[in-house]
Amino acid sequence: METDGVGTVVSLLVVPTLNVILCSGCGQCVAACPNKIFTLETIRFHKNAMITHPELCNACGRCVKTCPVAALLWDP
Ligand code: SF4
Ligand code: SF4
């Protein structure tokens, strides 16, 4: 959180970007994240990781390093 100099509070949310097309639903990011921001969901018979608690991310980078298909990146 920070202010913009005139008293407005701006929320800075830092969380990796998840590419759901690349995601294979392996679940490794779910296991790797110490803050449990991911869940595994099945959408139209395709299993995907979903970011369900982005506010809990501490930007440790474990999920980005763990993903075997590079579906998690810091930049879109
Ligand atoms: S960067 Fe760390 S805290 Fe954030 S989603 Fe990835 S593993 Fe979880
Ligand atoms: S580690 Fe990568 S491929 Fe596996 S569920 Fe997470 S985002 Fe998807």
Image: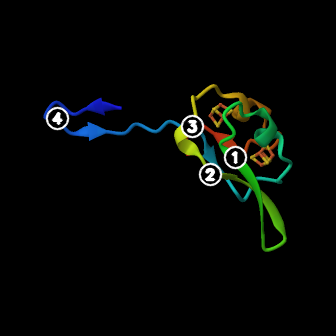
* Number of numbered discs: 4
Q: Residue at x 84, y 71 (%)?
A: 45
SS at mark 4? loop
- Would the CB of label 1 be found within 8 Å of ligand 2? yes
Type of the residue with mark 2:
Thr
Residue 54 in which image quadrant: top right
| Residue type highlighted by circle 3 | Leu
First reached walking from the N terminus: tag 4 or tag 3: 4
Secondary element at image label 2:
loop
Q: Residue at x 74, y 30 (%)?
A: 65
Residue tagged 4 = 7
Q: Quadrant of residue 5?
A: top left
User: Residue 20 appears at what percent x and percent y?
Assistant: 70, 57
Residue type of the residue flagged with mark 4: Gly
The reply to whether discs 1 and 3 touch (Cβ–Cβ < 8 Å) is no
Q: Residues within 10 Å of mark 2 (few under 14, many from 20)?
A: few
SS category of the residue bearing label 1: strand
Disc 2, disc 1: CB below 8 Å?
Answer: yes
**In this figure, which residue is indicated by the disc labeled 2?**
52
Task: Kindly identify which residue carries mark 3.
Answer: 56
Q: Ligand 1 closer than 8 Å to the CB at disc 3?
A: yes
